[in-house]
Amino acid sequence: VIQQDVQNKVMCIEDVAQADVELVWEPQWSQDMMTEAARLQLGLM
């Protein structure tokens, strides 16, 4: 369900022709993996 939801949202972005979504568990995700722009957009900075 998560993979399909993400793929559907990404495919709505202009100029995206294909999106392959792979769910992985390693390495454990952290906010350090986000770009500065993403952290700003989410109000984390």
Image (tube, rainbow, N blue to C red):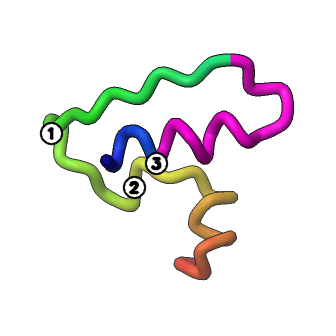
| 21 is higher (above) or lower (below) than 41 | above
Q: Which mark is residue 25?
A: 1
Sequence order check: which comes first, mark 3 or mark 1? 3
Which residue lies at the image location 51% right of the left edge and 36% below the top edge? 7
Please name whichever residue, 24 or 31, is drawn nearer the observer in this view of the structure. 24
Q: Tell me where the magenta segment starts and ends, as one range.
A: 6-17
Circle 3 sits on which residue?
A: 5
Determine whether, in the image, residue 24 is placed left or right of residue 13: left
Identify which amino acid the numbered label 3 is placed on. Asp
Sequence order check: which comes first, mark 1 or mark 2? 1
**Mark 1 residue crowding within 10 angstroms, few (<14) / some (14–19) / many (20+):** few
Contact between marks 3 and 2 (CB within 8 A): the answer is no
Which residue lies at the image location 48% right of the left edge and 45% below the top edge? 6
Q: Which mark is residue 41?
A: none
Circle 2 sits on which residue?
A: 32
Sequence order check: which comes first, mark 3 or mark 2? 3
Quarter of the rendering containing residue 10: top right
Quarter of the rendering containing residue 40: bottom right
Which residue lies at the image location 56% right of the left edge and 24% below the top edge? 19
- Between label 3 and label 2, give the one nearer the viewer: 3
